Amino acid sequence: MGWLPAQGRLAAGLLVNLAASICIVFLNKWLYVRLGFPNLSLTLVHFAITWLGLYLCQALGAFSPKSLQPSQVLPLALSFCGFVVFTNLSLQSNTIGTYQLAKAMTTPVIVVIQSLAYGKTFPLRIKLTLVPITLGVFLNSYYDVKFNVLGMAFATLGVLVTSLYQVWVGAKQHELQVNSMQLLYYQAPMSSAMLLFIIPFFEPVFGEGGIFGPWTLSAVIMVLLSGIIAFMVNLSIYWIIGNTSPVTYNMFGHFKFCITLLGGCLLFKDPLSVNQGLGILCTLLGILAYTHFKLSEQESNKSKLVQRP
C-alpha cells in the first residue's frame, strides 16, 4: 500500500482489520459449535498459514527478513500463543456477546500496564472514560443468561495475555527496529512449534475430533479459510499497532463488537437481555468519550507544533 498517502494506508489497514476480525469470529464460532473442530489444532492451522503467507510475501519482495535472536522473539511468541488460545477458548465457551464485550477490558488493562511498567501518563479525562467501559462489560457478563465460570476464566486470562501481547508488539517493533512483517515472520513459526508440542497432551491428533480426523471437504475448506483470514487479522494487528498505539487499536476494535453482537444474535440465536443492552450502551458511551478526548488531544498537539517558532 506504499502508493497510498499515509492517511489512506491507515484507513485501508483499519478496514482490512475490521472485515477480517468480524469474519474470523463468526467462522471460528461456526467451526466450534457446528463442526466441533478442536481449539488448539485450529490455532496451529492459523499460525502455520500465517507463516506460509509471510514466506510467500518475502519471496515476492514485500519485505526483507531481518536476522533476530530467538531469545528476542520468545516472550512475544509465548504471549501470542496465550493470546490466541485463550481468546478462542473464550469464544468457544461464551456467547459471542460476552466474548466480544469482555475484550473491551483490554483497554483498561493496557493503560495500567503502560502506566506501571513503562511510566506512560494518561490525562484524567482519558482514565475516566475507562469507568463506563469497565462497568458496561461487568453488566453484560453478570446478566448473560449463558454465564459460566470457566468461560469467564478463559475471558479473563485472554484479556491479561492479550494486553501484554499488544503492548509488547509495539515495544518490540521499536526496540528491534523491525516492521510488522519482519517480526511476525519469526514469531509465527516459533508459536507453531510450541503448539505442535503441547497439542497431543490436550486434544486428539488422529481419529474422531482430531486435527487429522475424518473431516469433510467443506470442513477442511472452512478451516483453511479461517487460517487465511487469521493471517490477515494478525498482519493488520501488527501493522496498526506499529503505526498507531495499542490503546488506539483497541478503541478502534471496540466498534467491531456492535456488528459482532448483531451477528451472534442472528446466526447463533444468542439471547440479549435488557440489562446486557444497558451494558453495551454504557461501553459504547465510554468508547465515544475516549475517541472525542483523544481527537481533541491530537488537535491540541498539532496546534502547539504549528505555533512553535
Image (cartoon, rainbow, N blue to C red):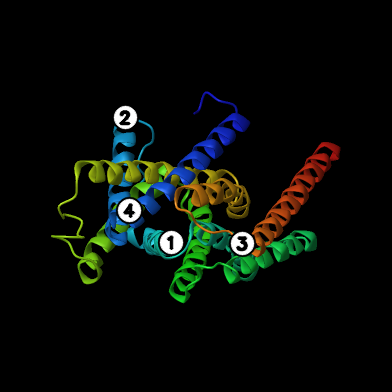
Q: Is residue 161 above or below residue 265?
A: below
Residue linked to disc 2: 60
Residue linked to disc 1: 83
Q: CA distance from mark 3 to mark 4?
A: 24 Å
Locate the C terminus and report the quarter of the image it occupies: top right
Judged by depth in the image, the label closer to the viewer, 2 or 3, is 3
Q: Earlier in the sequence, mark 2 or mark 4?
A: 4
Q: Is residue 121 visible?
A: no
Q: Is residue 191 above or below residue 59?
A: below
- Viewer-closest of 220 and 40: 220
- The answer to the question of whether label 1 and label 2 lie on touching residues, with beta carbons closer than 8 A, is no
Judged by depth in the image, the label closer to the viewer, 2 or 4, is 4
Residue linked to disc 3: 273
| Amino acid on which disc 2 is placed | Leu
Residue linked to disc 4: 34
Q: Earlier in the sequence, mark 3 or mark 4?
A: 4
- The answer to the question of whether label 1 and label 3 lie on touching residues, with beta carbons closer than 8 A, is no
Q: CA distance from mark 4 to mark 1?
A: 23 Å
Q: Helix, strand or loop at disc 3?
A: loop
Q: Helix, strand or loop at disc 2?
A: loop
Q: Quadrant of residue 7?
A: top right
Judged by depth in the image, the label closer to the viewer, 4 or 1, is 4
Q: CA distance from mark 2 to mark 3?
A: 50 Å
